[in-house]
Amino acid sequence: MDAFFASVELLRYPELRGQAVVVGGRSSHQPQRQPDGTHRFSRLRDYVGRGVSTTSTYEARALGVFSGMGLMKSARLAPDAILLPANFDAYRDCSRRFKAAVAGIAPLIEDRGIDEIYIDFSDIPEATEFLARRIKQAVFAATGLSCSIGIAPNKLLAKICSDLDKPGGITVLRHDEIADRIWPLAAKKINGIGPKSAQHLARLGINTIGELAATSVEILVNQFGRSTGAWLHCAAHGLDDRPLVTESEPKSISRESTFERDLHARHDRDELSGIFTDLCTRVADDLKRKGYACQTVGIKLRYADFHAVTRDLTLPAHVSDPIQIRKAAGECLKRVELTQRIRLLGVRASGLLPLAEMPLNAASLQAELPF
């Protein structure tokens, strides 16, 4: 999906089309409706805090503002950009609708998150580009949003191609076109080469995918280890034999919050307690919505000096109730040092079991939990 969160917001506020818009503000940045029916929007220059951009429109990206960037840094690059708070209920609704629209045409789908999927076209007897256009039309009819499609022999190449003609593009790549169309691209265009790996490659004089393909596998293994070195060599040559994963179970569900200011466990006890309870409640709501219970509850703290700690507690039975999750998380909290100021707090549920597979006596087991 193209600039997904921002595009959903533009459905609600069409007057912002063509403007630099950044999603990531707090509830206080909610647009205010004026007596004449127009909206007054917050500007990025007025933001103060440690939040990050969730996404941005292509106009904001042209100014250097991208997802994951601190909003204070973003404000220096695009002070006049509109700042909106995230509305995840709306994003999840659009996500469900776009995936259902695709499934009605090409049902063999791997879900890669809220705004991205892989589709296997192999057994669909339609011309490839016609099929892609039909999918784009179905997605637009279901959501009012545009998407970009990359069509290639495997998932690695399709992922690269999906980014080459955004927004609204269809890119088709044959394997014999890799040298001409893929090798000139920056090495970081390969999904899985992050900033640190890209920097390491650059120190070796490897900046493009073609330069990576021309590097011997022995050098890559020596620099990155056997597994990663071999993968880099294969990826640069467009080789990827991963199948579509059409069914998968989540391993954990988590929520976390980075504070606008560092909080102290004693001086800011009430504020921290409220945030902690809210995180536990949201994890419980996520479990219920996805149909799971958990057996392990964990917490994550990041202190003001950026040092992070985690603690986990495995329970005798699976739980999904927010009160029980709060109690278990509270037990974890007793096992960490709370003398330093805290900048981030998170709660995680793991050891998941579908509610449909819960034992019949689960309720009585939960009632015996030692809290």
Image: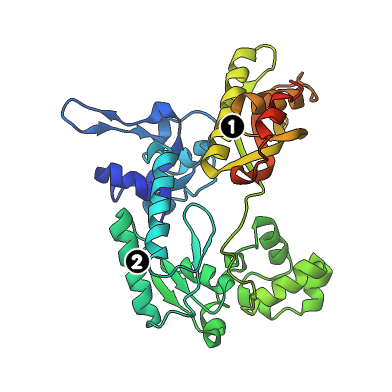
Name, please, the residue furthest toward the front.
360
Query: Residue 28 appears in which quarter of the rendering?
Result: top left
- In three-dimensional space, the C-alpha distance between marks 1 and 2, rounded to whole angstroms, equals 35 Å
In the rendered image, is residue 307 in sight? no
Compared to residue 35, the image places residue 193 above or below, namely below
Amino acid at dot 2: Lys
**Mark toward the viewer: 1 or 2:** 2
Q: Give the structural element (helix, strand or loop) at label 1.
A: strand
Quadrant of res 84: top left
Nearer to the camera, 180 or 257: 257
Q: What amino acid type is highlighted by mark number 1?
A: Ser
Identify the residue position indicated by label 1 in the image: 257
Residue at 79%, 68% in the rendered image: 227
Residue drawn at (68%, 17%) of the image: 264
Using residue 224 as the reference point, say whether residue 258 is left or right of it.
Answer: left
The tag earlier along the polypeptide, 1 or 2, is: 2
Is there a contact, CB below 8 Å, between mark 1 and mark 2? no
In percent of width and height, residue 212 lies at: 68, 75
Residue 84 visible, this orientation: yes
The x, y position of residue 166, in whole percent, is 40, 64
For disc 2, the marked residue is: 136
